Amino acid sequence: MISENLYNYYLSDLLAGKRSDCQKIVQELLDSGIEVKDLYSQLFQRSLYRVGELWENNRITVANEHLATSITESLLNLAYPAVFATERIGKKAVISCSANEFHQVGGKMVADILELNGWDGHFLGANTPPNDMAHFIQETRPDLVGLSLSILSNIDNLQRAIEVVRTDFPNMDLLIGGQAFRWGGFDIIKRYAGTEYIPTLDELEKGIKAG
Amino acid sequence: MTSIDVKDLKIMTRLKEETKEYHSKLESLPYFDALIERKLPLECYVNQLRALSIIHGVLENEIATVEDKPLSTIWNDELRKLPLLKEDLDFFKPRVVPDAVASIEIALSMTEKIRLRRIEKQLTLMGYLYVFEGSTLGNNMHRPDISTTFHLGRSEGCRYYSNYRDHAQTHWNRFSETVNGAQINPSLHDSVIEAAHEAFSGLEALYTALYPLEKSGKTFHVTRINPEAGNHPIPEDEREIQAALKASDRGWAEFDYYQQRYGDRGKRFSDSDTCWLVTLTALGPEAMVKQIDWLCRVLATRGMPSIMMEQTLRFLHEELSCAVADREPTYRKLCVSADILKQRREHFIQDTTLQALATEFEQAVGSEIADSHKNTGKLLVAAVVDEKNGIEGSVDALQVWLTDGDRFSSAWIRAVKKTIAKANNHAIMISS
């Protein structure tokens, strides 16, 4: 667990753009043995949501928000020694952001959680055209595909990606997630069989452990 | 050359020497070969203008607001290129050149770097300014190629390229003197040069993507409406885009305050936001309302009360239904959302009271002033209601500008404060 005090120090440093101070906090947490999942959800995710709220309420600029995202992305790398230490279980996943979706921190965290649980998580990154994604799935033959959406009005692109997966790989397990779904959009997911919405990293981990 | 020699060099000298290779590499790209041979396709040129408008839009806005002393003394509004790029893009509008997504994405990626530099190391934006201001010399050289290739008369369609006309070198000499005279700390020269390298690398990627141009399925990107809009969705049907722009014009025309406070830049954001609103009609009703609420909050905390959103949604429904009649049932969701905003507003202050308070405000300031500040009274009341509806900071965001003593008389300021106080009292009475 991350204390409220520590979270507030981190948030303050993040908003001030103090990259090295943020790095110090994260490294100390990792050295103390924090679970990567807790680091991601209780520190990174929570602080980025807060950054988003502060921008919405005109308390910080869009540049502050971009810097916070950039710092957070760079700090994900600190967890890699832990993320890739687990023995592989022979399962593969392809995680992608839909076309025109440029918020990729969430997608990266999902790929990392899968890696932590012994999966080979292939993260395709932001703004992946559906055909490129399909080509990669064809080559990789994963056990599941995950699609991330941060901006709800981009849901058309998500739908196109789902349709490509459902058409070309009808039996593929397909997980959908992302902060866009705070606003709704579940009716789109429900239209497609074998497609599941995963609201949190906790739920993701429970799901993959349960098989 | 010893390190002591390097430190003694003026920054402009170092920038010139240490970016020479980047500059040569850029000029040797196929784009410029095609330009010199007068074979460059129009869509490559127009998409170049689009990409540059994205970069200049952000760069100029960020530099204009820096606190860093050397940089703020170097910058002046005459250096702005965005207005010229917009003129050129307007000239080519009738030719409906599709947006080249790859080059736009590269431009957006450059703007991300510019924004980060603005926060982390303001002064290094000097490196970008050097590269883009320096390109005016190259522009001047290519002006005849452009005019001939695209059969342009005078400077139509190439205002960006012909900005300094035959005085490009004189301008550049003056710019160099200003930069050298700004007394940038020599210990920071390296980081400025690094930024210049980054700018050149970005331009290399951009011009590589521009020719030959990869066809994309998309015709319209939001940056053609507003270069600073980033990457959010807009309609793919041009009729819907034109309807959205008309609705934005009508919304803007209802309140003089918006043009007075936010100017042309604000209008561009209103245009791109209204285009985005059209895309929300693809969502379910609940999701759509939530998205509109989100935008209302973003705007109200920046001094734009939700009453304008309410009106714009209705204008948008009208314009869209006119433009694409068979989709009217879908567009009707916009009215439903507008009705919800109205209901929330009337929960605290009925329309009749809002109008009465607005009229009192107009009488207090006098008809001549009221006429040139159309519907400001309504905005004041609406901001109070937004605050009551949980959008913290709505009143302050509006009031701070409308009570600026440098802008308004003491009589006006008294009337603003009185209207806000009265609206607050009415709202308290209804809610209690």
Image (tube, rainbow, N blue to C red):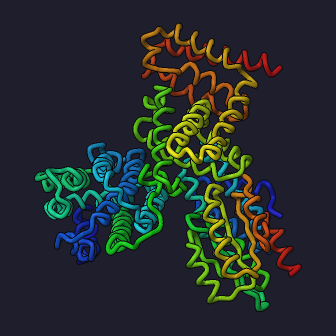
* Residue drawn at 62 percent across, 55 percent down: A153
Instruction: Using residue B135 as the reference point, say whether residue B408 is left or right of it.
Output: right
- Relative to A85, say whether A50 is above or below: above
Quadrant (top left, top right, bottom left, bottom right) of the N terminus of chain B = bottom left
Is residue B400 in sight in this rendering?
A: yes
* Residue drawn at 27 percent across, 64 percent down: B42
Instruction: Using residue B192 as the reference point, say whether residue A90 is left or right of it.
Output: right
Quadrant (top left, top right, bottom left, bottom right) of the C terminus of chain B = top right
Q: Which residue is the extreme one toward the right?
A: A210
Residue B181 percent coordinates (x, y)? 24, 51
The total of numbered circles placed on residues is 0
Q: Nearer the viewer, residue B423 or B76?
A: B423
Q: Quadrant of residue B417 in the image?
A: top right
Q: Which of B394 and B191 is in front in this view?
A: B394
* Residue drawn at 83 percent across, 69 percent down: A203
- Relative to B317, say whether B94 is above or below: below
Is residue A84 in sight in this rendering?
A: no
Residue B255 percent coordinates (x, y)? 50, 26
Q: Nearer the viewer, residue B60 or B1?
A: B60
Q: Quadrant of residue B295 in the image?
A: top right
Q: Which residue is the extreme one toward the left?
A: B166
Residue B261 percent coordinates (x, y)? 46, 31
Residue A177 percent coordinates (x, y)? 73, 66
Instruction: Using residue B307 as the reference point, say whether residue B413 is left or right of it.
Output: left
Q: Nearer the viewer, residue B70 or B213?
A: B213
